[in-house]
Amino acid sequence: ATVTAFQHSFKNAGKHNFTAILSNTSGCIANYTREVEVFETPQADFETANGQTQCLGVAPIQFNNTSKTNRTLDNYWWTFSDGTTDFTENPSKQFSAQGQYNVTLKVSNDKGCTSTATKTINTYEKPAVQVNVKTISGCLNDNAFELSYTNNNTSAAISNIVWETPAGTTALPQNPTK
């Protein structure tokens, strides 16, 4: 008959022995030793090229698995809070709307040990800008142009602008005149 008489959890990975010392009513004793192995749990982790911030309409976000393990990782389960999933080691993902998205990576090693990491990714809309050029003077010896812009996306406020010219890139006031 099989009887469950004892349960134990080990705190460290490695090989451990259980010894059962059994005796009957006649005083006969039997020792049985069994070796068990406890496998290390992987530590799931990941990063993105742009940290946890991404602008929409640019290249997809590249997720890079940086999980730590002393065994082979067999499975990668990526879950995105927009309802999509991916099962590759280093997926790329394009979100369709501005917002906060939870991204969860669950990894498992060749012994079935699992670990999960979750991070929040913030996505933002790009400015939708109309650039206006007003010619003040177009003559070679005395030319001047007034540049201005209109941001048509109120969800993407402009905090900085850099105007580029053939002479080089220069940070100028938001509505420069030259």
Image (cartoon, rainbow, N blue to C red):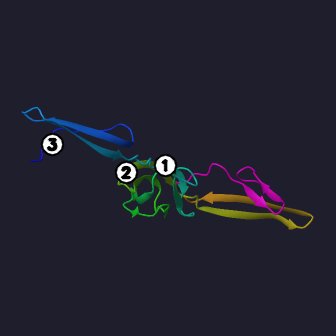
> Quarter-wise, where is residue 31 in the image?
top left
Closest to the observer, 165 or 24: 24
Residue extending farthest left: 25
- Residue at 43% in and 48% down: 42
Observer able to see residue 122: yes
Q: Residues within 10 Å of mark 2 (few under 14, many from 20)?
A: some
Specify the label residue 114 is tagged with.
2
Disc nearest the viewer among 1 and 3: 3
Specify the label residue 151 is tagged with.
none
Does 175 appear in magenta? yes
Task: Give me the C-alpha separation between circle 3 and circle 2.
Answer: 26 Å
The first of marks 3 and 2 along the sequence is: 3
The first of marks 1 and 3 along the sequence is: 3
- Residue at 78% in and 57% down: 169
Task: Give me the C-alpha separation between circle 1 and circle 2.
Answer: 12 Å
User: Which kind of residue does numbered mark 1 sit on?
Assistant: Lys
Closest to the observer, 109 or 92: 109
> What span is in magenta?
154-177
Q: Which residue is mark 1?
A: 68
Residue extending farthest bottom: 139
- Relative placement, left or right, of 166 versus 66 is right
